Structures are given as structure tokens and as C-alpha cells.
Amino acid sequence: MASRYIANTPAEQDQMLRVIGAASVEELLVKIPPKARLSRPLALPPALAETDLIRHLKTLADANADADRYACFLGAGSYDHYVPSPINHLVLRGEFFTAYTPYQPEASQGTLRTIYEYQTMIAELTGMDVANASIYDGASSVAEAVLMAHAATERTEVVVSHGVNPLYRRVTATYCEGPRMRLRDAGAPGGTTDLAAATRLCGPKTAALVVQSPNFYGCLEDIASAAEIAHAAGAVLIVVADPVNLGVLEAPGKLGADLVVGEGQGLGVPMSFGGPNLGVFAAKRELVRRMPGRLVGATVDRDGRRGFVLTLQTREQHIRRAKATSNICTNVALCALMATIYLATLGRHGLVKVGELSAAKAHYAARRLTALSGVSLRFQAPFFKEFTLKLPKPPDRVVARLAKERILAGVPLKAFDRALADCLLVAVTEKRTKEEIDAFAQALERAVV
Amino acid sequence: MPHVPKELRYTRDHEWAKREDDRVRVGITAYAAEQLGDVVFVELPKVGATATAKKPFGVVESVKAVSDLFAPVSGEIVEVNTGLPQAPETVNADPYGRGWMLVIAPSHKAEWAQLLTAEQYEEFLAQGAH
Amino acid sequence: MSAASYDKLIFELSSPGRVAYSLPESDVPTSDARSLLPEAYLRAEAPRLPEVSEFDVVRHYSRLSQLNYGVDTHFYPLGSCTMKYNPKINEDMARVAGFARLHPLAPEALSQGALRLMHELAAMLAEIAGMDAVSLQPAAGAQGELAGVLMIRAYHAARGEKRTKVLVPDSAHGTNPASTALAGYEVVEVKSQPNGEVDLDELARHLDTDVAAFMITVPNTLGMFEPRIVEITELCHAKGVQVYMDGANLNAILGITRPGDLGFDVCHFNLHKTFTTPHGGGGPGAGPVGVKAHLEPFLPVPVVTKDGDRYALDWKRPQSIGKLQAFWGNFGMHVRAYTYIRTMGADGLRSVADNAILNANYIMKRLEKAYDVAVPGPCMHECVVSARRQKKLGVTATDIAKRLLDLGFYAPSTYFPLIVEEALMIEPTETEAKETLDAFCDAMIQIARETETSPQVVQDAPVTTPVRRLDQTRAAREPDLRWSPAAK
């Protein structure tokens, strides 16, 4: 049967074969040794017509607890923030989503301009001089930042706060396997980085100190003190931040960060079961030539008109090959476009409002939930939109029970940290309503008594 | 054929070396500059660093190419052209003059004799150097 | 004003007081969030983001999009990138709430549909590549390469072998040496024969007990199938060397031959090439990695498993190389690729390869008089021609690429592979119709003629695009990487 994605009819295929001078496509495969040929059709499930396929995929989708049908209090690096409607319409324009890396800048000014806007917005939010065109996700942005610090300082150790998302720490460890960097863990027993421990661990071998704020447990970190510790040791301070929060929270660059990285999914990118996400990467100017990933710069054309190009490309793998600053090829341009449209839409005041609403609702939720007997905040440090609850009943079971009431209560921390086996990480975005929070509190009360 | 001053010595990696009393001034040849195209970035070591003959001491970049810079002789780096990072175009404009890169106090005098003469370098270029 | 003359940045549309968002008023008792947080943590000054209306946003980005060429609007023969049609149904399915609005840490019991989709996609990719197991986690081809090379490294280490080098042909994509170096290996470049094929003698000379892996692209970057590939993988295995296939060109061999059957131990897939997930202006892609059974213990965690009717994320894999992304991979892309494979079925995928090969050979044949074909055909899914003849007349591969933009086509890949002088790498894909290929070939032939009669027209191109050739040197010498009001 003809495929709707292949235009040429058998008659047209024959015409083409005649031009080529071959009797069949088979004749064009002469270089493939017969013994290497697959002698049977691929064993794949049968092709489905569009309506059947939709039915099948909707069946799969229905088996998932999505945030349309459930009140989502899950965070830990992926958040249910507001996604303004125009984003989806605009990213679906074929000129954006079916283009590729702007190798021919004259025919790619749309993509290049949006990336330049994105770089400007991220640099502004993070308080840094420059931002790249994005990389894969928050975790790989931390890993790449560590490798960059390693290259810039020629030092072999990195001190990572225990408050950094454990999934990010795991990815960083994987990336550090090749260069054999040593990861040293600065504990966070009180919910924030043990700065005395960080001071002890930072020394002449330390390439970077990595802290996250708000950290994995939701607590705000003292970035300025972390900067002093890192800089006293001649190390780079890497701050992991969620840009959605930076309408309200101080820009890490203003507090002494040398590199600001993080997960930008909250900027209008769907949660999509964890990917694709948006790796944010911003740096001080003096580090720009060691940055991974694409950079877009402004220039002029032959007639003096403003135009945009990929620049400083000698850092990259297609030119520097084995000596490149990173192996990354593309960025996540479409997610960066979502973030750009998001930030344009929210604008100067909207992003502040998102942060304020999230913080207000999170604090209201914390107050409601900790009013229940046996439920308390695990840490006393200030938090923003996410917090760690200590529960009197096993969090796994509480989560399962609340799911029956269409509430995704939070992330049980047992899998991440055994010392926190009785804890639940709860995130509250501006989308959660008072009604949902109250229902959460009532359901939790029933679950823990 | 690009300019190859007679009084200088050369490497097969297209650096030139010029004896100035007991020191050696180093840059890249006009041929190298031409091959690279518009130089956009030069990375040089700090004064006091050690150069080792035939080993890289820095990097020169155009828009689409990167080239390691190789030391013609070993020794301590006693002077660096600090103006180059701000004005990399000087390398194209005046490779044998204002485009110089560094000055080395040689530690192995015998290395000088191993460098190519202008005639040898010209011959090397004529043979289709790469 | 024509679409092409639009020259605004969103910041330049800003007018204080305009809003484009819609957020509710706070419904909780404490609405002053700033009183809840210590002053020291608060931003001193609101970020300088634009203030525009929703319609400003929509018109601005619509107009910016019109400055792009994309597959939907233009033939996009970018070699090695497989710029085929991206089906619309894929986009619809990726946006179903049960997928798009699913949190990665939703309880396993409530993510069964997503996990099942991932499990089935991994199994389908394994069948397509003849591999025993597939991890969907890598975010892109380059990350798939890193995962693959790290698995090879872990495999050798587990056997107590300390091998330090990886061989990569000089015709390889830049990510191959970069990923290999990132995995801690010394990269040794192996010279190819002029026709792009592996030089077996040269390879044999390099193969010693210090070599961990040989990494090659099949079909190679000249669009040719490696005729002695089975001998190559056997030769490597005899020396304890693992063989990695860069799957960038998998589109050419769907249902015809399989990496696993050719003897490869690892290969990655580019879902954004072969399996129609959109290129998005440069990502996000997805780069699943497939392995033979002996490498399975080293797969990144977690692995999606099936036990009876239940799907789960298995973290208990002590020999795993670790993790590459925070979560489970670019799931949105998995949905699209799954949709595509289930649309096509086995016969459909085979016809993809057949038509991709047919289209590339047709172009090669039609261009063989006007340009120097890099390697005589037949080719696989793409062909490489050289503009060395044109260069003698002062017209380079870049000039030809720019002239194509004027004539209504995106350009082929240029100057790649590195081993072909003035290379133009043309990959039409199976989704293009004969009349489009003819129009493109006519344009290429016209440019060759112009090179002889009026080279200035080619050298001056493009003239119809929103901007003309841009000053790359200035961009690199004085990097201007963010907008500022003063610069306007």
C-alpha cells in the first residue's frame, strides 16, 4: 500500500530508475554484501491507519496520571507552571519547527533572532554577561559547567553541595568519569549546604563549588557565602537555579556566581514525562570561549543591515573535534523558543507575579499541611515554592492513597536519600488553587491518622 | 607565493623565528595567516611560562579554523604581545612585524640550527605544505 | 513591507504597561509573597524583560518565523541531517495531555502508559537495528555516542582490560572524536581511502591491545555503503576491539540490513533524522543507544522493564555507567518516533530506505555532468559532489550554497566530509517528490552554468534573503551576544 509520507508513485519511480540506468532499487544496493542483508521483513507490529493509531495512543495516554486530571504537587526539577496559549501555536509554525541548526544564516534569521533574544533574557535573569543557546537539560548543564570549570582552572576536583538535585549529581558523576574528576560531597544535613564543610573541602585542587538555590529540598541557599568560599580557594562558583524563580529571587550573578546553570522547563515547556527539557547555561564574559554549545551573535551583512550568526564556533566539535569544549552538537532550540515566547509573554511584571503567586501558595500549603498532627517541615531554612515534609506514615503509601483522590501529593524522598525515608517533597506552583491545597490537606489528614 | 623574509628561520608548522641577540622572537608566517583567513582570536601564554620546541604554546583562530601554535625553540617566555588579543587582525596585516607573538630566552641553543632556512621553507611551501 | 524586511527584536517592541499574560489574583490568605522571604534573597530590581501585548508576541514571532527556511516550506537537502517531512499526527500525539502533561516522577503505577510506550519503542528500535537492548535516555546523537563509548569503557574495565585509544576515521562527524575524548579516550584518526572507504591495512596497523573501540558511520559520510564492513567488524573483534556504529545514516538501511547483523556492538539512533521527530531549528532531538547483550549490564539507569503486565523503572543495575539526563530521556520525542514507526510498519520503513536511495541516486545522476561526483555511484541515501571544478573559476561550495538560497532551496551541507575538497553533501530523503528533485537539479545545473558565464551572480548571492552574506569575522572578533538598549 502507498505511504502518505512518500510521494513518488511506482510510475515516477520507474522514470527515475530509467534516468539512473538501473532496473530496480535492488540494483543500487550492490555494495551491500549479500550475507549482510536482512532476509526477512522487520518484525514490527502492523502499520496502523491514523484513526486506529490515535485510538491506540490515547489508550496509552489514558493510563497516565497527567496534570490535567490530577492536582500536581510534584517538582524535583519538573514543574506544572502556566503555559500561555500562544507558545504552542507559534512553535508549531513549520518555519520554526522543521528548520535545523542555522548553518545558512541568511535563510535562518528567524531562529537566530529568537536565540539572540533568548540569550539576552537568560543573561538578564541570571545576572550574567552571556548565555548560550541552551543545552539538553538541567542535569547536563551542571555536568557541562563542571567540565568547563575543570578546563578553565586545570584543577581536578569539584565540591558539590548535597542540596544539588541528586539526579543532577548522578549525571555529573557520569560526565566526570572520562576526565576522572573527583566529586566531593558537601553535606546539607540542615537542609542547606554545610558551609563549614564546603570551606574545608575547597582547596587548591578544587575547580568548582556547586550549589543549588532553591536546592533540591526547596531551601534557599546563601549564595554570597558560597561565592566567598569558592573564590577564596581560586575555584569557580556554579549556581544551579530555576529561571522561573528569578523574577522574585536575586540573580545569582549579583551574588557572586561565575556560572549559572539549571533547568528551564518551567519557562513554558511541557513536563512531557521529563523531556525534552531546557538546559540553561550562563557565564561571566571571561569564560565565554570555554562555553559549551551554540552561541548567536549580532553582526552586519554586506549592505550594513543588522543580522545574526552562529559565532565563536571554533569552540565546537565540528571544528575542534577531539579538543572541543563539549561534544554537544545542537542545542534544544525549540524549547529555547518556548522559553523566549514565555518570557516575552510574561514580561517584566508577569514573571514576578508567577514567582510571588507560587511562593504565596507554597507557604499557604506548608502552613495547612503542617497543621496536621505528625506532619512537619523537615528543615527550618527559608523555602520558595517547594518544601520537604516529614510524615508520620510511609510517604509511598500516602502518595498512593492521595492519588485515588486525584492528588499527586509529592515526591517521596526515600529513593533519593535513605535518611529522608519519611519525607515527601511538595511543590506548589501558581497554578494550584486554594481549593486544591485545602483538598490536599484534608486528604492528607485522612491518610495519616 | 607569500612573503618569506630571508633573515628569518621557520618551522614546518609555519611559525617564524628571529634571533635578537640571545633571544628569539616568534610569530606565524604570511602563508599561515593567509591560510587561516581573518584571524579573530589569539591565545598566548603568560610571561614566565616555558616553551618546548615543537610543542604547542598557544592557539590562533579564524572564524572556521583553529590552529595550534608550536614553539620553534625551547626556553622561558620573556615577552608576550599583549596587544594581539585585542587586535587579532594585526596577525593578517603584519605577520612578521606587529603581529609577533612572543619572545623566548632559548635554553637549548642547538635547536636553532634545526629550523628551516628561508630557502628550505620556500621549498617546503612549493611542495604543497600542509 | 515585505515579510523579509522585518527587523525587530522583541525588546524593541516594548512599551511600559503592556501585558500579554493572564494570571489570577492570589486566592490564599498571604498574598504578599515578599513578606514571606528574607529580604537578602529577593531581587533588587525586576528583570528587564519586554512589556508587550499578546498580539505583539504573536505577530513578532510569526514574522520572525517567516525569515526562516524550513522543511515545510523549502526543499532542505542538508546532508547527514535527514531533513524529511515531519508528520503532523506526531505533533498531535505528543500533545495529548496524558503524555505532555505527565510529570516524570508521577507514581509508576500511574505512568504505565508512558512506560509501556517507551518499552515498546525500545523493542522496535532494537529490532530495526538488530540489537539486544536499547536505552532511550540520551538526549541527542552526541549524548548517545557518549553513552555508547562509556559503556564500552565500562565493559573493558569489567574484564580487567585497560585500553586507552579509540579509532575514528578522518571522514567522521565531529561529535565522534569529541564524544570519545569526553569519555576519557585518546582519539586516533584513521585515514580513509580516497573513496571514503575504510583502508583495511591502515586499520589493521592501528588495531592493537590498547584500542578500545572503532567508531564508524554506515553508510559512510560520502553516502556509500562500506562493502567490507563484515570483515571490518570481524577484524576488530579478533583484537578484542568493540565496534560502534554512528547511526546518523540509518535511514538508508531500514529493513535492508541491520547494524547488529553487521557485527556492531553499539549503535545510536537519531530519532530526529530517521524517525521524523522535528529538528526544531536545532533540537531537541533524541539519541537512543542500542547494544548487544554483553553490554546490556552497562546501560544508563533507569532501564524500563516489563514484568507480566507491569512496567517499571529498574534502578538496581550495579554495572550501569550512570545517568545522562535528569529523567528518562526526551519522552516527547519518543512519542513522535513511536507514532511514526506504528504508522509505517515494516514494509513502510523498508520503502523509506528504498525511496531515499532512489532519490539520492537520481540527484547524483542528474548532477554528474555539471559537478564532480566525489565517489562514483551507486550511492545510498545521500550523494557528495565536489565544486572543485567551479572553484577554479572562482566559485566555491559556499557560493553555490548561497545561490541555492536565492533559487528557493535550502543548501546542502558544505565542506563535509572533510576529506572531499569543496564538498556539497546532498540528502534528499524519501519524502521529496520527483518534481522537487528535478527543480533542485535544474537549479544546481543553472548555477554551474552561471559559474562559467556570470560567476558574479553566484559570488554575490544571496540577494533575495532577509539579509545578505553576514560578517562572520566581526561577529567573532567583537562578540555581541545579547541585546542592550544602548546598542540600538
Image (cartoon, rainbow, N blue to C red):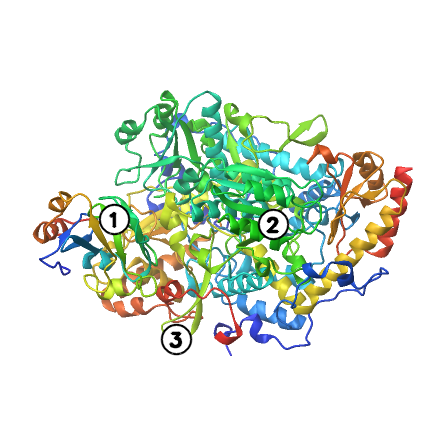
Residue assigned mark 3: A304
Label 3, secondary structure: give it: loop
Tag nearer the camera, 2 or 1: 1
Q: On screen, C147 above or below A229?
A: above
Label 2, secondary structure: give it: loop
Q: Amino acid at mark 1?
A: Glu
Compute the Cα span from label 3 to label 1: 46 Å
Can residue A3 be seen in this snapshot? no
Q: Which mark is residue A277?
A: 2
Picture quadrant where residue A425 is located: top right
Q: Residues within 10 Å of mark 3 (few under 14, many from 20)?
A: few
Identify the residue shown where x is 30% and y is 49%.
B49
Compute the Cα span from label 2 to label 3: 37 Å
Q: Which mark is residue C365?
A: none
How many numbered tags mark residues here? 3
Task: Using the image as rendered, state which of residue A36 and residue B42 is in the foreground.
Answer: B42
User: Which subunit holds the residue at mark 1?
Assistant: B
Identify the residue shown where x is 30% and y is 54%.
B47
Label 1, secondary structure: give it: strand
User: Which subunit holds the residue at mark 3?
Assistant: A
Q: Which mark is residue B76?
A: 1
Q: Amino acid at mark 2?
A: Asn
Q: Are marks 2 and 3 in contact (CB under 8 Å)?
A: no
Q: Are marks 3 and 1 in contact (CB under 8 Å)?
A: no
Q: Amino acid at mark 3?
A: Gly
Compute the Cα span from label 2 to label 1: 49 Å
User: Which subunit holds the residue at mark 2?
Assistant: A
